């Protein structure tokens, strides 16, 4: 049967095969380079945010306010606009929203961010949720503040819950 095929079929098949292999290798290479770029962007973002003096002060103020009896909610009052306290809350949340936007647009590597900031994502969102809800309630229409940060929180919380269930299940199933 092979002897019956014209001699031109083999070179055409070889060209088709080599082209297919080249396309697959090029695609793999591009994906690998993009992953490295996302990882580098994540590390750069995290390093810069850890060295930004104004952001560090804002986070410290955010934590201090969140630990107060009433949490961050009093600072959502319209009369508090422009205060150091409200600006610290907004600066901290803006930084986390920017990080989440980078993740959602595949600019920043999610795995690296979650590995280094999981507790921050969870605790800061939970502390800020009443603040965000109060400010959103004053907005016309259905404007959601920090939508990407909110989505990142939901996905990290879901993964965290699954991980805890998994560990609880494996811990109880050992003989």
Image (cartoon, grey):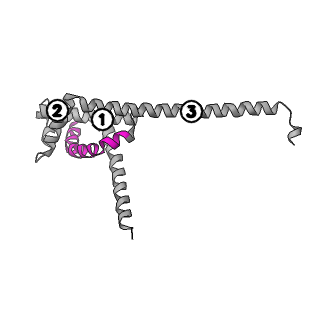
Distance, label 1 to label 2, CA atoms, is: 18 Å
Question: Which span is picked out in magenta?
Answer: 112-139
Label at residue 97 = 1
Q: Is residue 137 magenta-colored?
A: yes
Describe residue 58's horizontal placement relative to residue 41 as left or right.
left
Quick one: SS at disc 2? helix
Label at residue 125 = none
Q: Estimate how packed mark 3 is, as few (under 14), some (14 to 19) or many (20 or more) residues with alpha carbons within 10 Å.
A: few
Residue 68 at x, y percent in the picture: 11, 45
| Mark earlier in primary sequence (3, 2) | 3
Residue highlighted by disc 3: 27
Residue highlighted by disc 2: 57
Residue drawn at x 11%, y 34% as measured from the top left: 80
| Mark earlier in primary sequence (1, 3) | 3
Q: Estimate how packed mark 1 is, as few (under 14), some (14 to 19) or many (20 or more) residues with alpha carbons within 10 Å.
A: many
Residue 167 at x, y percent in the picture: 36, 59
């Amino acid at each position: 049967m092979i002897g019956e095929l014209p001699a031109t079929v083999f070179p055409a098949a070889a060209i088709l095969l080599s082209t297919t292999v080249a396309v697959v290798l090029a695609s793999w290479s591009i994906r690998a380079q993009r992953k490295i770029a996302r990882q580098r962007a994540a590390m750069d973002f995290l390093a810069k945010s850890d060295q930004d003096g104004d952001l560090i002060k804002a986070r410290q103020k955010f934590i201090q306010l969140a630990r107060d009896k009433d949490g961050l909610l009093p600072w959502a009052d319209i009369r508090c606009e422009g205060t150091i306290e409200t600006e610290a809350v907004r600066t901290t949340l803006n930084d986390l929203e920017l990080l989440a936007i980078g993740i959602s647009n595949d600019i920043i590597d999610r795995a690296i961010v979650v590995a280094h900031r999981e507790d921050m994502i969870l605790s800061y969102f939970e502390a800020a949720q009443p603040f965000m809800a109060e400010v959103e309630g004053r907005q016309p229409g259905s404007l959601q503040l920090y939508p990407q940060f909110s989505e990142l929180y939901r996905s990290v919380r879901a993964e965290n819950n699954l991980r805890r269930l998994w560990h609880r299940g494996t811990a109880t199933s050992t003989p």
